[in-house]
Amino acid sequence: MRLGRQTILAALLGASVVVNLVLGGVLLAQPGRGHGGPSRGFERMIGRLEATLPETDRPRFREVLQAERPRYAEALQALRASRAEVDAAMLRQPFDPAALQQAMARSSERWVAFSMQFGEALSQALAAISPEGRARVAAAGSPGE
């Protein structure tokens, strides 16, 4: 069976949307986000993903994400820096809406870059676990849960 270019692009777009929904859902579901410092949000997100997995999948999931970390570490660092830039722009006196908009635009660009890089790593980690584990991660990222 040969897949057409549009089918492949649609599948990639769908996969990207799923990764962003999972990441966004886990990040947005964090109570008190931001109070633990910028370096804790990602680790907390990974912990929430791991907590949804069957116990037997957790070590392999963690091992693959750790092995894949060089793939997304730089993008994660850039994302963290951009969030600090947004905070600084919000607190600046006198307040400059244009500076905030620029900082938010940079943060959005860095979020996209991180999502792409981490999505590749997450795909590898999800490929290494059971179908039940993947189903649990998908359910954890579903809106309204």
Image: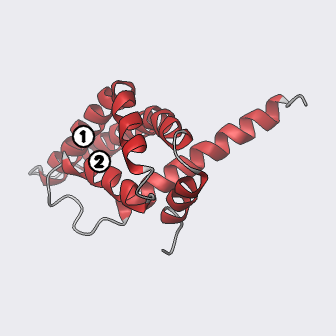
Q: Residue sitting at 30 percent across and 65 percent down?
A: 30
Q: Could you tell whether 13 is left or right of 97 in the image?
A: right
Image location of residue 10, percent across then percent down: 74, 41
- Neighbour tally class for label 1: few under 14, some 14-19, many 20 plus, Cα within 10 Å: some
- Disc 2 residue type (three-letter): Phe
Looking at this view, name the residue that lies furthest to the right: 1
Report which quarter residue 108 is drawn in. Answer: top left
What is the secondary structure assignment of the residue under circle 2?
A: helix
What is the secondary structure assignment of the residue under circle 1?
A: helix
- Neighbour tally class for label 2: few under 14, some 14-19, many 20 plus, Cα within 10 Å: some
Residue at the disc numbered 2:
42
Residue at the disc numbered 1:
80
Q: Residue sitting at 33 percent across and 33 percent down?
A: 66
Circle nearer the viewer, 2 or 1:
2
- Disc 1 residue type (three-letter): Arg
Report which quarter residue 77 is drawn in. Answer: top left
In the image, residue 129 above or below residue 24 = above
Nearer the observer, 41 or 133: 133
Mark 2 or mark 1: name the one nearer the start of the chain: 2
